[in-house]
Image (cartoon, rainbow, N blue to C red):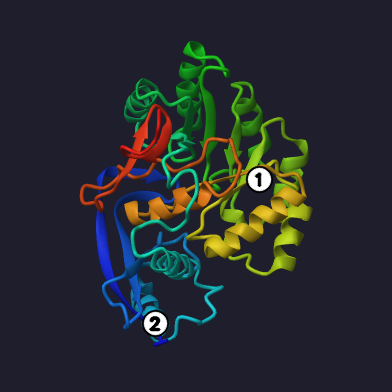
Amino acid sequence: MHKLRAKYEHRTFHFKRPSGTSRGILTEKQAWFISIWNPENPQVIGRGECSVIPGLSPDFVSLESKTDYENKLNEVCENLTLDLNNWPSIKFGVETALLDLENGGTGNYFNNAFTSGQKQIPINGLVWMGDPQFMQDQIEEKIEAGFSTIKMKIGAIDFNSEIRLLQGIRSKYSPEQIILRVDANGAFIPKEAPNKLERLSELAIHSIEQPIKAGQWKEMSTLCSSTQLPIALDEELIGINLLSEKLDLIQTIQPQYIILKPSLHGGLSGTREWIKIAESNNIPWWITSALESNIGLKAICQFTAEFENHLPQGLGTGSLYTDNVESDLLVERGCISLKEKYNK
């Protein structure tokens, strides 16, 4: 058998509207697509997406990282067996491209109930940061679209304004009608966090993602043990690659949930390891895309369907870009499925 060949191409995707997080406003998104094929059968090509978020991805700290990143991609294309533990976005791209190749280059990375059209995945509707009216408009749009779980990013505008937005939802919809999640992206400082979590808990919030910045294990452990509002770790897991480190983090902090992004948390294999650790410690989890285009999103959806997890997942990012890749994914009534396949 001939050695597999590989190449990559760069794409810049553009947001339909600027998308706010506590780390700033996003207007465009960098991605690299890796293609892998066997020269004996070159018409069958597996594709995977290497997706990065500057300032968050451990393998792409800023836009100045592009040269180093593409140097690593060149190395990978020459040697697909390289250790990519410190390059989770590239690891995800290579793993998914190889799975696609194995399945005939059809865009099916797994053969399961999702890919066969027998299963849809419940997802949350994401509300980006912005001025209060912009956020209110998004909330109403998500509820009208049939989402029963809303995730609101907080931490960039005045906290009292964010509380009022959440109170507005709660005044109309009970926790049984609308599940509310919030994502602080590490925006709170530790001494203020307990009071803010207490105020949020009064609104029957399902959970808060990463209330304080990652790396403060002692402070995060204290919050998790004392708060009435369940805490989900997200950024906290980034860069934790060794099994022993993962176990240490989970046992030290003992969070109520963890949230997994394959492009940030070790690719598919690293995510599987996190899931195994979480389940062995009775910690629920869900999976979220990290602003991938439809190529990466489709792979993550199929991967998610490999597990029996009935919590709403964070997979509703396929409509973010003006120039996204064409896709057969369909988001409808708060669920994602394959167009014309899911048997309703």
Q: Which mark is residue 17?
A: none
Residue 336, horizontal then vertical, whole percent: 41, 38
The reply, left or right, for residue 168 in relation to residue 286 is left
Vertical comparison of 226 with 109: above or below: above
Q: Which residue shows up at 61% across the image and 42% down it?
A: 308
Badge 1 is on which residue?
Answer: 190
Lower position in the chain sequence, tag 2 or tag 1 = 2
Q: Are marks 2 and 1 in contact (CB under 8 Å)?
A: no
Q: Which residue shows up at 39% across the image and 68% down it?
A: 101
Q: Assess disc 1: are there few (<14), some (14-19) or many (≥20) residues with their C-alpha within 10 Å of its C-alpha.
A: some
Q: Which residue shows up at 35% across the image and 25% down it?
A: 145
Vertical comparison of 103 with 338: above or below: below
Q: Nearer the viewer, residue 124 or 116?
A: 116
The reply, left or right, for residue 139 in relation to residue 195 is left
Which three-letter amino acid code belongs to the residue tagged 1? Pro
Q: Quadrant of residue 104?
A: bottom left
Badge 2 is on which residue?
Answer: 4
Which three-letter amino acid code belongs to the residue tagged 2? Leu
